[in-house]
Image: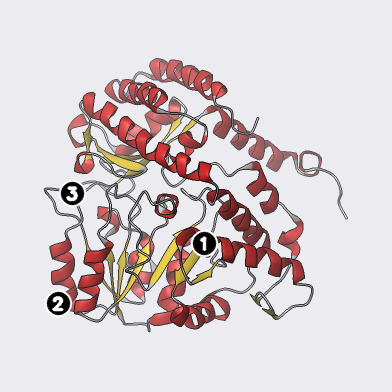
């Protein structure tokens, strides 16, 4: 067996790992779907559990030697149940998209009608986008936001539901900054006898701490990722009622997946433990304060915030009147070591690869311990870069300032 460390075994991969460590440590991460897992989560993720096969569920495996996997999977399940106040949790999905597919696999047949929020208006690929298997295997109906208010158009949701009678309605989004009215979705679903699924991949931490409305009382299924505001390992999870538990578990294994990633189950258990601590609520409160402060500071600099602000951890900036695209903005900010992602906005005229907007989120910089004063400083840098987008010299200068600020809020080094 090779016992040499990574840098001696494979210097090329080691170099990339160290490069990413430096990038994360000394750059500002503003992508709302990203966060920094704790050292304890990373330790569990890099543990020997990666070696283990454990098809099945705790106490009912198709492999021997599962006594320790059973322990970590049970810890993850019990902690997730407590965190969200649900009867049943499946913690095996490898990602948020797999979690969504798991629910569809449990309930739908190919050709059934599914209704979700359009990608262009803030939904997710796996909510029935045409390019996704969820838009190819199912008849997909897509709703969006009201063009004026840029809030979910609940009347349109209701009209489309009555017209197309989807078997399943998905609520939840990847690029929508406002609270979601899960009760209204339930009423609409009830009116056509549809199943209701919420995807809370983005605000899950805020939901768990009571800072964002919970879909749990209203939805038949709730899916999430575990790596965004929940600050755990990359992965997915699904919550449901006790009655739906059996069908759901069968859909994930053996329906969709084989081997659960035992090292990820261990890391999920650790993350959920951390999420149950009182300081996690303070962290989530600060995420929202930071996002509101950041958005307000950019609005003062004449940047239009989609829907006029945010209730959560993210917001979108509309660059339509600026003469450059979201892609240009992402690249210019990248040269200043500020990482954002280009994003489509309502009334988009450009392709999803170019876009007229950028999406900004505060979960990662809040994990560093940054608060309102730092938000105002960073918003100032973002405005400086975007107001003089071809000034590469200024971008480099800001990059130096970014590094100095990051050094005051260390992560892993
Ligand atoms: N694509 C992810 C995001 O960045 O929001 C959601 O899965």
Answer yes or no: do the residues labelled 2 and 3 have beta carbons within 8 Å? no
Numbered label attached to residue 82: 1
Q: Earlier in the sequence, mark 1 or mark 3?
A: 1
Residue at the disc numbered 2: 163
Q: Secondary structure at mark 3?
A: loop
State the quadrant of the C terminus.
top right
Q: Position of residue 259 (x, y in %)?
A: 64, 71
At a point 55% along the width and 41% down the height, the residue shown is 36
Q: Mark 1 near ligand 1 (CB under 8 Å)?
A: no
- The vertical placement of 311 against 253, above or below, is above
Which of the two labelled residues, at mark 1 and mark 2, occupies the earlier sequence position?
Answer: 1
Q: Position of residue 265 (x, y in %)?
A: 63, 61
Residue at the image position 24 percent from the left and 67 percent from the top: 185
- Give the residue at mark 3: 150
1 vs 2, front mark: 1
Q: Quadrant of residue 127?
A: bottom left
Q: Position of residue 165 (x, y in %)?
A: 21, 79
Decide if residue 26 is in sight here.
Answer: yes
CA separation, marks 2 and 3? 23 Å
Q: Nearer the viewer, residue 169 or 83?
A: 83
């Amino acid at each position: 067996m090779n016992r040499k460390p990574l840098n001696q075994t494979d210097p090329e991969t080691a170099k990339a790992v160290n490069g990413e460590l430096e990038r994360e440590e000394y750059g500002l991460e503003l992508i709302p779907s990203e966060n920094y897992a704790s050292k304890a989560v990373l330790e569990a993720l890099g543990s020997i559990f990666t070696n283990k096969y454990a098809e099945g569920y705790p106490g009912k495996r198709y492999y021997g030697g599962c006594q320790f996997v059973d322990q970590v999977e049970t810890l993850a399940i019990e902690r997730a149940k407590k965190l969200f106040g649900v009867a049943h949790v499946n913690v095996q999905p490898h990602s948020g998209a797999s979690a969504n597919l798991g629910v569809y696999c449990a309930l739908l047949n190919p050709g059934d009608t599914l209704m979700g929020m359009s990608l262009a208006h803030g939904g997710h690929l796996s909510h029935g986008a045409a390019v996704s298997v969820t838009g190819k295997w199912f008849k997909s109906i897509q709703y969006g936001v009201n063009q004026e208010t840029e809030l979910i158009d609940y009347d349109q949701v209701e009209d489309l539901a009555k017209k197309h009678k989807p078997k399943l309605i998905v609520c939840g989004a990847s690029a929508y900054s406002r609270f979601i009215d899960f009760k209204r979705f339930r009423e609409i679903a009830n009116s056509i006898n549809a199943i209701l699924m919420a995807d809370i991949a983005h605000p899950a931490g805020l939901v768990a701490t009571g800072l964002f409305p919970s879909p749990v009382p209203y939805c038949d299924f709730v899916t999430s990722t575990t790596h965004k505001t929940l600050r755990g390992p990359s992965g997915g999870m699904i919550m449901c009622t006790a009655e739906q538990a059996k069908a759901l578990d069968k859909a994930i294994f053996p329906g969709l997946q084989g081997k659960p990633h035992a090292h990820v189950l261990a890391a999920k258990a650790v993350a959920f433990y951390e999420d149950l601590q009182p300081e996690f609520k303070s962290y989530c409160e600060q995420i929202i304060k930071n996002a509101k402060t950041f958005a307000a500071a950019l609005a003062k600099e004449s940047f239009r915030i989609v829907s006029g602000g945010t209730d959560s951890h993210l917001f979108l900036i509309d660059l339509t009147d600026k003469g450059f695209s979201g892609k240009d903005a992402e690249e210019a900010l990248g040269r200043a070591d500020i990482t954002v992602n280009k994003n489509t906005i309502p009334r988009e005229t450009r392709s999803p690869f170019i876009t007229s907007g950028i999406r900004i989120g505060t979960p990662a910089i809040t994990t560093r311990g940054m608060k309102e004063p730092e938000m105002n400083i960073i918003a100032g840098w973002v405005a400086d870069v975007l107001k003089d987008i071809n000034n590469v010299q200024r971008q480099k200068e800001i990059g130096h300032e970014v590094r100095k600020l990051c050094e005051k809020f260390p992560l892993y080094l």
